[in-house]
Amino acid sequence: MNDPVEIAGLNLLVKQVSKINDPAKAVLVAEAVKVPLVNLSEVEDNHGNKSFDMQMVAYIPNILTPPDPPPSAFPIPIPTNGENPDIHSIFFKYNGVFRIKTLINTLAGDHTVLCRDFEIVYDASENPTGYDAYMFTINYKLLFKDMLTAEAVIVRDVNLDPETSRGTVTTPTYV
């Protein structure tokens, strides 16, 4: 879909972006899922190189104000009615690897999981009137073999209005 981006030792590539609700009408506020839904799959190419596909569904307010690009982020090309995608409204950001406290019972017994931390970043009003549902597929691969491995990914939905930011943790077999 666009060229890969390198951020903090990861190669990231947007493979798919699509609006999945009826383009003629927005999803009502009461019907919008409050956190991104994430599926993580390990992918292996013909040469045995491994990477990961993150398939995400996120409900984004349907009226956005283009923000300043956040650090360690790249634009997600959002399909429009015109010929060129909107590359100024939604960004995907990588924050690194962190130990996140969860309800997941880990082998260590401390209920913490080492996670790669990602954000879908946009700027919208505090009280949106409706949402659009988008499906994103973003592939990432580690650029160096000695990089810190993670047990899961966390993907948060970050409206630059901090009162409306949301997130979810997803654990695959290997990250």
Image: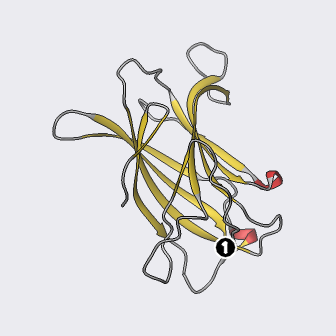
Which residue is labeled 1 in the image? Answer: 62
Seen as rendered, the residue at the extreme left is: 46
- The picture quadrant where one finds residue 122 is bottom right
Which part of the image, by quadrant, shows the N terminus? Answer: bottom left
Seen as rendered, the residue at the extreme bottom is: 24
- The picture quadrant where one finds residue 50 is top left
Q: Is residue 52 left or right of residue 107?
A: left
Q: Is residue 79 above or below residue 153?
A: below
Tell me what residue is drawn at x 50 percent, y 27 percent.
151
Q: Position of residue 65 (x, y in %)?
A: 70, 68
Tell me what residue is drawn at x 74 percent, y 51 percent.
165
Check disc 1: other Cα within 10 Å, few if <14, some if 14-19, many if 20+: some
Q: Position of residue 79 (x, y in %)?
A: 48, 73
Q: Is residue 121 above or below residue 151?
A: below
| Mark 1 secondary-structure assignment | loop
Q: Position of residue 88 (x, y in %)?
A: 58, 64
- The picture quadrant where one finds residue 118 is top right
